[in-house]
Image (cartoon, helix red, strand yellow):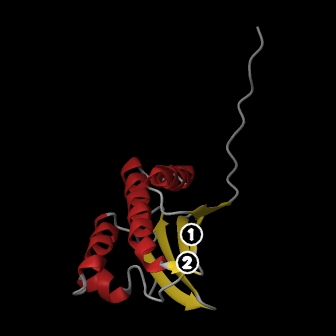
Amino acid sequence: MTSASLKKMSTDPTHTELSLQNDPRLMAAVGAIVSHSAQRIGLPAEAQEGLAAAVVDACRETFPLLGDQDGNNSALKIIVEDFQDRVEVTIEHAGEALPTAGLDSFCGGGSDGAMAGISNSLQDTRVDRVQYETHDGRSRMKLTKYFGGRKATV
């Protein structure tokens, strides 16, 4: 009788990039990729699901900001990275230079109704950090979820 040897999953950080068109059928794939990265670092199932839901909601809320650039449909660039202590998901796009979820809407539920949905989603899932920047005509929002009780410093 021969026995199969089990290989341990690598603990090296992973980096996955997606180019996402506004197609609802693709949202499940985004959620699965984010959940997998969260699982790799050992986040509990509830935290995995919450982070994936926040990312999917953020993508849905960002698509209206893209508009139609030069007659072409725009896409979101999504980067999912997992490290030993956190998962970082960056949502990047060209288009309207407005944050998907800025500090004002995240903390106070701003007056804009469109912002309230993503704000509630991020708060409900306990995403540990939301960063936003615009550089060279590209807007980037980074969602970070820490593992092991570590929290971001302000």
Residue 75, numbered label: 1
Residue with the most extreme right position: 2
Is 153 or 117 nearer to us in this picture?
117
Q: Is 136 displayed left or right of 61 in the figure? A: right
* Residue at (57% x, 50% y) in the render: 40
Query: Counting residues from the N terminus, which is met first, the one under dot 1 or under dot 2?
Result: 1
Helix, strand or loop under label 1 = loop
Within 10 Å of the Cα at label 1, are there few (<14), some (14-19), or many (20+) other Cα atoms?
Answer: some
Image location of residue 115, percent across then percent down: 30, 79
Is 111 or 152 nearer to us in this picture?
111
> In the rendered image, which quarter is residue 120 located in?
bottom left
Q: Is residue 153 above or below residue 25?
A: below
Residue 83, numbered label: none
Image location of residue 28, percent across then percent down: 46, 50
Helix, strand or loop under label 2 = strand
Would you say the residues marked 1 and 2 are in contact, meaning their CB atoms lie under 8 Å apart? yes
- Name the residue type under label 1: Ala
- Between circles 1 and 2, the one closer to the viewer is 1
* Residue at (56% x, 62% y) in the render: 20
Disc 1 and disc 2: Cα gap in Å?
7 Å
- Name the residue type under label 2: His
Q: Is residue 39 above or below residue 147?
A: above
Image location of residue 1, percent across then percent down: 76, 8
Q: Which residue is mark 2?
A: 93
Within 10 Å of the Cα at label 2, are there few (<14), some (14-19), or many (20+) other Cα atoms?
Answer: many
* Residue at (58% x, 77% y) in the render: 71
